[in-house]
Amino acid sequence: MDRRRFLMRSSTQARSFFSAPASRTPTDPSRTRLQPPSGHRLSFRRLIRCGSGHAHAAPAAGDDGPPRSDRILSSAGSGSSLESSLDRAAAAAEVSPALVAEVLKKLSNAGALALSFFRWAEKRRGFEYSAESYHALIEALGKIKQFSLVWKVVDEMKRRGFLTKETFGLISRRYARARKVKEAIEAFERMEKFGLSLDSSDFNRLLDTLCKSRNVVKAQEVFDKMKGRFKLDLKSYSILLEGWGQEMNFLRMMEVYREMKDEGFELDVVAYGIMINAHCKLKKYDDAIELYHEMLAKNCKPTPHIFCTLINGLGSEKRLSEAVKFFEQSKAFGFAPEAPTYNALAGAYCWSMRMDDAYRVLDEMRKCGVGPNSRTYDIILHHLVKARRSKEAYSVFQKMSNEPGCEPTLSTYEIIVRMFCNEDRTDMALRVWKQMKEKGVLPGMHMFSTVISSLCHENKLDDACKYFQEMMDVGIRPPANTFSKLKQCLLDEGRKDDVLNFSRKIDKLRKAPLVKL
């Protein structure tokens, strides 16, 4: 299918959206100076749907099926409290463990709401405590750095018998991503205080957590300091190889490789994949191919992941014919192409801006029954936006919702919202934002910051204040540069009181827990 046919169904709608800005209701300035919530009785519609102006209808009479997560996430009317909104959404139905876990995961970017929802759910008929729901709650609270609450959840899990090593691994990961490396290591050590013994797999998990959060130097220090306490294995070294490779520090990676060899370990297929990926990141593609042939010489069969790595790397360097060759080799090894392999091939065509070929890959995926998926579309959208083909990108975006398994994800919405913001089309960015909220997808810190900065740039300060307030309402601490930009714009307009009001709220958010357990 060529590009014209691919886009035909949505191009007319796209033209109408681009030809005129979305209609806007003038913002009432009195509504932008939002008061802090009483306790945590928040307007659920404002938090979940950004005051879009239309609440979803209440469940129809006789609708006594189980409540769905989308109904839970988008049901409340204006001015209602969280609990009453949730009560209406769930009606008299039972709240199943699966539903609780699903909603908590969708609230992962809104930790305050996640905790309030959890406390509401545990009072409902059908609720059951589970490690899965507790872990989803910890993930949400950790994202907003409410670690004192996280440890209270841990105490509760201990009392109820749900505490596992996975819990501590999750906490360490959230600490590490918050740049609290010392606390991440302490969380690892605290396992023993909760009656869980430490072993080599736990040590490897800590190393992996530190490396994946871009704390490789600290991971190496921990490795050197603690390696006498644990029995090292190939995985221990492979984690460090991958960490230094991701940091593109070839010298340190080779130091680990030599130490690994000195300890009697040889590369296995996983370690080969790590080394090949590191060489591709460093643009040492010929060396990566040499490692691939070394694998074959040692009768070490490459995995689909290794083929994806080579296709991605060579494609990004516009060595398209070689990328396609490795795609064909993967099939020759007996691997039926899977979605990641096809995605790598589509990406390779995109790097060379052969978009018609990329669209044909999507057709082949459909014929083979392996996609496409949201990631496939994200790859195409990224390249269309990069090439400033905005109309085409928006048409592709519209098409996604009509294809099973391809509903836009948060990353998809981020691509499109950022595209419109960069073009000073906040009207379109907010239209997409509204659509995202109606689908139950919640924005993260970066997306809030993008929209707020763009609204400031267009001098739409009432709207900027509204979204800034919403960011705090869901428990996200505004980045300093975002507040700095909004602050300066407000001061330029003589709105010193708004600046002081936001400053107090940020200070309160920094010092005090959002909600009580």
Image (tube, helix red, strand yellow):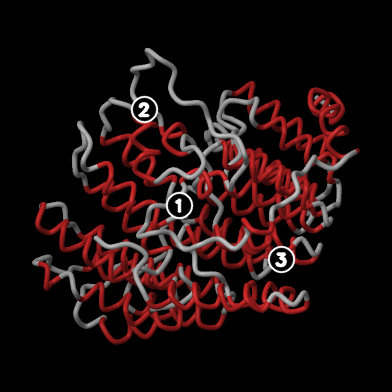
Crowd around label 3: few <14 · some 14–19 · many ≥20 (10 Å): many
Q: Looking at the picture, how far across and down is residue 80, in whole percent? A: 44, 43
State the image coordinates of residue 41 (x, y, percent, origin top left).
38, 52
Q: Which residue is mark 3?
A: 453
Identified at 80% across, 58% down, the residue is 422
Q: In the rendered view of the protein, which quadrant contains the N terminus?
A: top right
Quadrant in which the C terminus appears: bottom left
Of label 2 and label 3, which has the lower sequence position?
A: 2
Q: CA distance from mark 2 to mark 3?
A: 37 Å
> How many neighbours does mark 1 have within 10 angstroms: few (below 14), some (14-19), or many (20 or more)?
some
| Mark linked to residue 22 | none
Indicate the amino acid at tag 2: Pro
- Contact between marks 2 and 3 (CB within 8 A): the answer is no
Q: Residue furthest top?
A: 62
Q: Amino acid at mark 1?
A: Cys
What's the amino acid at mark 3?
A: Ser
Measure the C-alpha gap from mark 1 to mark 3: 51 Å
**Residue 329 seen in this snapshot:** no
- Mark 3 residue element: helix
Residue lying farthest to the right in this orientation: 19
Dot 1 or dot 2: first in sequence order is: 2
Q: Which mark is residue 67?
A: 2
Q: Nearer the viewer, residue 175 or 441?
A: 441
Q: Which residue is mark 1?
A: 300
